[in-house]
C-alpha cells in the first residue's frame, strides 16, 4: 500500500479532505499552532510538528524531515498549504515523490498569493494546479489542472471559495491516480 505523508502550515482543509479519503501515515506541520494539527488529532492521524527556528539551519531541519519520511517508509509527500520552499536536502532524498497544489492555473500566478493575484489582475478565469515539486517556486512539472471561472457577481470571498472547492476535487483525483503507481 502506498504510504502517504501530508505537510501543511495552516488551516488544513485540503489535508482534511485527503485524510477522509486515503490512509495518511502522518501529518507534519512546521507551525505548532496551526489548526491542521487539531484536524489530525480529531481524525486520529499521527502528527508531528517542529519549527525551522529550532534547528541550526534549513539543512538540519530537513534532515529531521527526511528521517521521519524514511522511518515511515513514505512513498508520496503531499504538500497542502506547506508554506516553505523545499530545500536541497529534502529534494535530494525525495524528488519525484513530492507533489503540491497551487490555487491558480500555473504558470499563471505562482507564489504565495495565487488567488488574490488572479483576482487583482481581473481575470475571467483562474484555476487550480497539482504539480511535482522541484527547486523552484511552483515551477515543477504539471500533473493536472482545472479551470475555475470568475463570475461577474463574485466577491474575492466567493471566488476564493470556488477555487477551494476545485482543490478538494482535484487533489484527491490526482492522489488516487498516483497511488495506483506505487
Ligand atoms: C490552498 O489554497 C493551497 O492551494 C495553498 O494553500 C492553501 C491551503 O489551504 N497552497 P488549507 O490549509 O488546505 O485550508
Image (tube, rainbow, N blue to C red):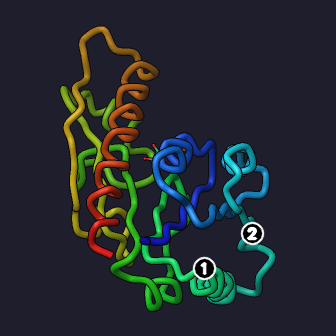
Q: 10 Å neighbourhood of mark 1: few (<14), some, or many (≥20)?
A: some
Q: Quarter holding the N terminus?
A: bottom left
**Which residue does the image show at 78% across and 50% down from the upper left?**
33
User: How far separated are the C-alphas under marks 2 and 1?
Assistant: 20 Å
Is 6 displayed left or right of 182 in the figure? right
> Tag 1's secondary structure?
loop
Query: What residue would you read off at disc 1?
Result: 72
Of residues 29 and 27, the one nearer the viewer is 27
Position of residue 102 measured from the top left corner of the image (x, y, whole percent): 37, 51
**Which residue does the image show at 56% across and 43% down from the upper left?**
16
Is 158 displayed left or right of 145 in the figure? right
Position of residue 156 measured from the top left corner of the image (x, y, whole percent): 42, 22
Instruction: Residue 94: tell me if it is visible.
Output: yes
Query: What residue would you read off at disc 2?
Result: 51
Q: Residue furthest front?
A: 1
**Which residue does the image show at 51% across and 77% down from the upper left?**
74
Numbered mark located on residue 63 in the image: none
Image: 41 above or below 75: above
Task: Respond yes or no on whether mark 1 lies under 8 Å from ligand 1.
Answer: no
Residue 104 appears in which quarter of the rendering?
A: top left
Image: 173 above or below 175: above
> Tag 2's secondary structure?
loop
Q: 10 Å neighbourhood of mark 2: few (<14), some, or many (≥20)?
A: few
Of residues 59 and 22, the one nearer the viewer is 22
Looking at marks 2 and 1 on the same chain, the residue that comes earlier in the sequence is marked by: 2
Instruction: Residue 58: tell me if it is visible.
Output: no
Position of residue 179 measured from the top left corner of the image (x, y, whole percent): 34, 66
**Which residue does the image show at 26% across and 39% down from the upper left?**
127
Residue 52 appears in which quarter of the rendering?
A: bottom right
Q: Quarter holding the C terminus?
A: bottom left
Amino acid at each position: 500500500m502506498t504510504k502517504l505523508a501530508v505537510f501543511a502550515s495552516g488551516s488544513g482543509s485540503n489535508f482534511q479532505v485527503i485524510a477522509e479519503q486515503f490512509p495518511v501515515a502522518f501529518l507534519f506541520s512546521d507551525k505548532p499552532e496551526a489548526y491542521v494539527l487539531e484536524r489530525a488529532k480529531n481524525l486520529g492521524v499521527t502528527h508531528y510538528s517542529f519549527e525551522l527556528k529550532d534547528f541550526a539551519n534549513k539543512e538540519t531541519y530537513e534532515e529531521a524531515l527526511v528521517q521521519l519520511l524514511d522511518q515511515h517508509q513514505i512513498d508520496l509527500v503531499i504538500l497542502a498549504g506547506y508554506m516553505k520552499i523545499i530545500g536541497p536536502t529534502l529534494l535530494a532524498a525525495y524528488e519525484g515523490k513530492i507533489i503540491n497544489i497551487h490555487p491558480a492555473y500555473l504558470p499563471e500566478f505562482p507564489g504565495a498569493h495565487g488567488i488574490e493575484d488572479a483576482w487583482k489582475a481581473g481575470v475571467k478565469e483562474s484555476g487550480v494546479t497539482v504539480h511535482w515539486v522541484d527547486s523552484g517556486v511552483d515551477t515543477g512539472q504539471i500533473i493536472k489542472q482545472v479551470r475555475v471561472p470568475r463570475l461577474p457577481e463574485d466577491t474575492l470571498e466567493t471566488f476564493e471559495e470556488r477555487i477551494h472547492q476545485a482543490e478538494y476535487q482535484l487533489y484527491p483525483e490526482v492522489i488516487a491516480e498516483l497511488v495506483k503507481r506505487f
